[in-house]
Image: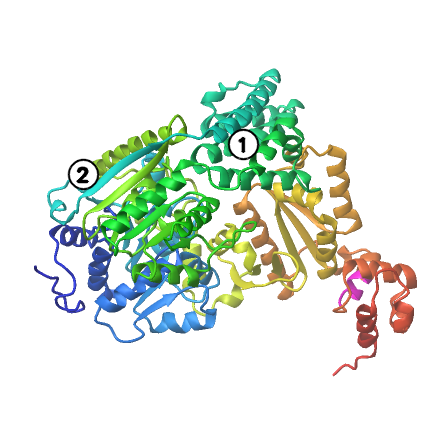
Amino acid sequence: MPHVSHPLIPPDRIEERAYQTNIAKHALDGNTLVVLPTGMGKTAVALRVAAERLALGKILMLAPTKPLVEQHFRYFSQNLLLEEGDVAMFTGSNPPAKRIEMWGGARLCISTPEVIKNDLIAERYTLRDVSLLIVDECHRTVGNYAYVFIAERYAATAAQPLILGMTASPGSDPEMVAEICGHLAINIVESRVETDADVRPYVHEREIEYRTVNLPEDLWLALSVLNSMIEDRLSTLADLGYRVPRREALSMKALNGIMAQIQSRMQQRDRTAYTAVSVHAELMKLKHGVTMAESQGTTALKAYLSRLESEGASGAGSKASKRLCADERFKRLLALADSWTRELHPKADEVVRIVLDQLVLDPDSRVIVFATYRDGVSMLVNHLAEAGVPAIRFVGQASRDAEKGLSQKEQIEAIRKFREGEYHVLVATSVGEEGLDIPSTDLVVFYEAVPSEVRSIQRKGRTGRNSAGKIIVLITKGTTDETFRWVSNTREKQMQKGVKAMRGGNVPAVPVPAGSSAAEGGQLTLADAAIRAATLAAGGGEDRPAVVVDNREMSSKVAEHLSNLGAKITLAALPVGDYAIGDRVLVERKTAQDFVDTLVDRDLFGQIASLAESASRPVLIVEGGSIADLYELRNIHPNAIRNTLASIAVDFDVSLIFTRDAEETAGMLYAFARREMGEAKGERSFHRHKSARSGREELEYILTAVPEVGPKAAREILAAFGTLRAVFSASAEELMQVKGVGEKTAGGIVEAAERKYS
């Protein structure tokens, strides 16, 4: 067979396929979205485009997980004729200083997006010399995902930008596809399906079989109890005047519609909305229980009911959980669940039969079993082990309850063991759907049907890559499994139709909002100019407002907006607060929901006290609502909210600011930073000179200059001693008599009083 011939690609290494050649050629003409079925060589296309663009500058490839990054690193290292160190792999485990060094020496960098986003915001390097940005699994380029920020920053700063987005499934929702294309500035779409003439020679047969099972009596009984409780909650909402569907038609879409009605009533100050919110939460929990019973089985349902029981018994548990647990029907359901000593859902035994049949047919087979929930993954691993089939578990990193996640290193090791045959069966959640490089998977089993066409396509793509494969989907009769099967199939067809339409140049467009970095006629907007100034100006850091951002705040968009405004950002682990500005201003940011949750469930006043003690100008920003909105979020009496806000402002002397969203929060922080920059330069506005402070404030301000003394402590000490002379003349023992003053604070004052000027 012919192979690709290129000076940077080893001979006889990459198979020449006409459709890949055509796609790679067109991808050099403009920002391109490549939609190819899994196993059809998206990475080979990316390699060929990268080989062409290397002469123009650095290549940056993004992938959503560390296992995928490691996989791409191996592929590009083996298939490009570059020097050692020319291909670099970035992950969060590389310290910033090392990444800066690697970035300077690498010609091709492969990274998770969060690492690049943080480095760009902290200005550790720029994308100016990047000649190609490859975005793998680019269907994620929506909302707040890091791909969005990087793509827009790249378009604004690169000298010769070109973007290549790759996915097996962009989705069937036209608005979502338009958002992806908008963020990546796509103007070319290259897609193929398995029936296309130039692809068909490389496609291996994939047989899809749907196997139905019957729900056992115990689970039908559990369902009847759950459905009875759902009927009661729907009746309660109907009695309150809400439009509700029949219980059989209660889908997530219907539940979202009910919530929209509740929110509308809240805006009208309807008191019934508070009751309705809690009833809606009960419905959500009960509906999830129905899903567990129908598609997952007794092990998953029993674990879920146990978690609900623990939540209801906890002092911090929600009212919804407490009311559910107080329902006599729920108690009977718990008693029934206690009698389940093994998995009763027939799907579990069916998985064992399917796997054993496959391994008898071919002992060297590789089988992937997909299950949506971790409880199901653990149950299946144990069920297979009892049948004499060792299987390896593959789940995400986060640990939930008793279920421990897998670190990225453990994920990579699990894939290696499966690929090399140490385990023939991999049982995975959705984390195994994207980009696994397991070329010889012979069978994929869906423990349940999934309504998402993206997930369904990715699961199916795990087999039939290098040889014929089989897909078996388990369906429970008379349940949502049947509905999800048809929903997924319909959406897959819609997606293929939509992608096919885009081939002819009909790339979906989204309206460009005011202030967006997209400009008409190719001209830079003010936002673009700010980005360029922030990222490209050599040595200009001292002339820009500076903000220290706590690492935990990088999950919000505030830091992105600050960076786009031109602020100089430093990332750090702040012991108190979220944003530090100069040596005086410390800002704590809370969403409106987090504010009321912290007030009810955690120690809000303790956090405020720490903030007040840590800065001479402490600020609390409440984002995403007004004072009136706070009244409605947790059914807290308005007087309680008012008293809390009054205490924050008066007792703790913390400035309180409400902002609409992350962008407005960033604007406020930028304004603070500009003023502090002016203060540092000695610039005084009419309300910043010394006479603006009262005599009392002036004394407090002077005392807080002692490193160990916060504003609250300064007030207490001055109230006790009366004058600064008396304070600085006091002994440590005398100072420690003041409420709240400890040995460290007292020692700091005495040391300051005795320190010689030099």
* Residue range highlighted in magenta: 699-705
In the rendered image, residue 707, in percent from the top left (x then y), is placed at 74, 69
- Crowdedness near tag 1: few (<14), some (14–19) or many (≥20) residues, C-alpha within 10 Å: some
Q: How many marks?
A: 2
Identify the residue under disc 1: 284
The residue sitting at 32% across, 40% down in the picture is 456
- Work out which quarter of the rendered image holds the C terminus and state it: bottom right
The answer to whether one can see residue 563 in this image is yes
Residue 211 part of the magenta-drawn span:
no
Q: Which residue is mark 2?
A: 504
User: Which is nearer the eye, 732 or 14?
Assistant: 14
- Mark 2 falls on what kind of element? loop
Name the kind of residue labelled 2 in the image.
Answer: Gly
Q: Residue at x 36, y 66 (%)?
A: 89
- At horizontal 36% and vertical 72% (from top left) the residue drawn is 104
The answer to whether residue 607 is left or right of residue 6 is: right
